[in-house]
Image: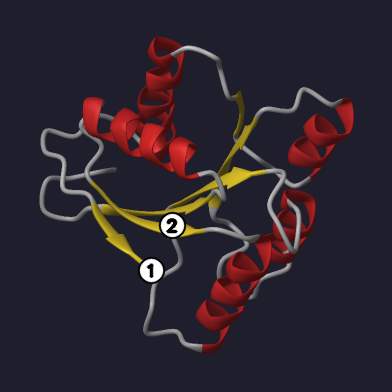
Amino acid sequence: MLTETSPCRIVLAEDNPADVRLVREALRENKVNCELRVLTDGEEVVSFITSLDLDSKHPCPDLLLLDMHLPKRDGKEVLKHLRASARCARTRVVVLTSSDAPSDHQSAEKNAAIHYFRKPSNLEQFMHLGQIVKDVLGGPTSQQSQTEQQ
């Protein structure tokens, strides 16, 4: 459950700066209390997960918002690596993608993604992502405290 005093940890794997801004706005508008770490390619995400497996002092993210079409390693590879992780295999995943390809849906389902969010073309629909994140993480928050780590 999200609380005012303990922000959730979200990793956003997204290479498009405009989409990063929209995700930040959706979280802010929906008052999601989180620390947001932005990683811009699949290799960074895989390295981050590996580093968490090697260092138990750092917690796994509460949620991975994953673009399926990342540079260097795609979302399918990232999902496979995450699910094989010794510590972070149970991290919840929401897939963010502009793709409606059946293979992307199948890969997301096969690797236990909780939600498949197809990036909409209008701002109002994109803002719905914040509510999806709240629902996935366990409910409402009354404060928003978003920071970026890179």
Query: Disc 2 designates what residue?
Result: 38
Front-most of 71 and 136?
71
Q: Quadrant of residue 38?
A: bottom left
The three-letter amino acid code for the residue at tag 2 is Val
Q: Is residue 145 left or right of residue 79?
A: left
Hey, which quadrant is residue 131 in on the image? top left
Q: Depth check: 61 or 65 in front?
A: 65
Q: Residues within 10 Å of mark 2 (few under 14, many from 20)?
A: many
Q: Residue at x 44, y 34 (%)?
A: 136
Q: Is disc 2 in contact with disc 1, using a CB cutoff of under 8 Å?
A: yes
* Colour convention: secondary structure
Q: Is residue 84 left or right of residue 93?
A: right
Residue 65: give its label. none
> Split into 4 quadrants, where in the image is the N terminus?
top left
Q: What residue is disc 1 on?
A: 150
For mark 2, give the secondary structure. Answer: strand
- Which residue sits at x=78%, y=59%? 77
Q: Residue furthest bottom?
A: 54
Whole-angstrom CA distance, mark 2 to mark 1, is: 6 Å
Residue 2 point in image, percent of width and height: 25, 43
Q: Residue at x 79, y 30 (%)?
A: 105
**N-terminal-most mark, 2 or 1:** 2
Task: State the SS at label 1.
Answer: loop
